[in-house]
Image (tube, helix red, strand yellow):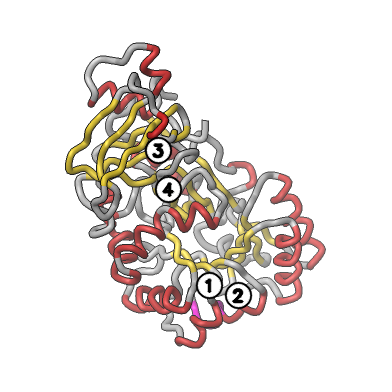
Amino acid sequence: MRALPLAALALVACAGPEPAPAQAADGLVLEALAPGGAPLTVWLRGQKLGDPAEAGLGVPRRALPRRYLAPAVVDAHTHLTYVNRTYGPTTRCPGLPEPCTVQDALLEAGVAAAVDLASPLDALPTGRLRVAYSGPMLTAPGGYPTNAWGYDGYGWPVETPAQAEAAVERLAELGARVLKLPLDSRPALDTVTASAAVARAHRLGMTVAAHAPTVAAVEAALALGVDLLAHAPVEPISDALAARWAPRAVVGTLSSFSSGAAAQDNLHKLAAAGARVLYGTDLGNGNRPGISAAELAGLTAALGPAGALEAATAAPAAYFGFDDLGALLPGKAACVLVLAEDPSVDPTALARPLEVLGEGCAAY
């Protein structure tokens, strides 16, 4: 797609003449600040971060005074195929040749991985972005989302436990790592069929997510053994219900689906009870590819700055098995956000990177 990787584009723009081949092979050492202000040195060494203590004297160095370094963001709720319906298959990527893809736009913004929580079987997301996807939601005939925005393949209707188990097995064969069930609208899967789907998904090592924005739907998710709420609930939940949900996980989507004071308060209760909170934008639901300052602001209000920073980086990387992301440590992906502001004070700084550096941002 692009003539140069992200790292090359950034270095050409910001570091003067292109380095000699021997220097390029050695990578680049960055000297800046970690979130919180402590000195931080990282070694961009190809697609991985090297140990800066082992970088030889010949490795080029770049000092970044008063700049902060942060790992790439992971968006735990997207609809990469649906966003094409909203904005078209290509989008505007500042600094890149146009047109570019939605995945290009996310990578350029500093998002190195995404979780796609509904896409048709014939349009499963592929490309250079790391993606964990669910494929279509498993639903009842005529159920959500086939009776709404997802009429053209974003839901897979099943009627019996056998059909549900077969559908889950097919999704796993196609590479799905997540199963998503809608639990808040009618018609809905009966309990026996939904339970069969959840059990088969768990046996196959899949995470089970639920569209469960109401109190009743959260109760149903608990009864079924669901692992992840795809949105912060929009109806007020009790402290007792929040405690029962822990230690499961929840995606915020506070800037899109779960806007409002109740959802933010619910997220605070869930986090306080021990639930793992993950940054997610519900990309495709009226928003554009990138890192959402509004989502980060909502997470900060609910969790505090440290919680919001973790929810956007380390927490979703660990939860979904993007093991090379989430931290700036040797052996992790060479993908670094250069920031003008301390993200441990204001996590929305992640949405305003001065540069995104490293050959490890893309999956290949």
Query: In front: 278, or 329?
Result: 329
Q: Residues within 10 Å of mark 3 (few under 14, many from 20)?
A: many
> Residue 27: percent from the left, percent from the top?
38, 24
Q: Residues within 10 Å of mark 1 (few under 14, many from 20)?
A: many
The disc, 1 or 3, on the residue closer to the chain's N-terminal end is 1
Residue at the image point whose x is 39% and y is 13% from the top: 22
The disc, 3 or 4, on the residue closer to the chain's N-terminal end is 4
Stretch of the chain drawn in magenta: 214-218
**Label 2 SS:** helix
**Label 4 SS:** loop
Residue 361 - label: none
Residue 221 - label: 2
Query: In front: 101, or 25?
Result: 25
Work out which quarter of the rendered image holds the N terminus and state it. top left
Q: Is residue 61 above or below residue 238?
A: above
**Label 1 SS:** loop
Q: With 279 as the anchor, is 38 left or right in this view?
A: left
> Residue 298: percent from the left, percent from the top?
31, 66
Give me the C-alpha separation between circle 1 and circle 4. 31 Å
Q: Residues within 10 Å of mark 2 (few under 14, many from 20)?
A: many
Q: With 28 as the anchor, is 191 left or right in this view?
A: right
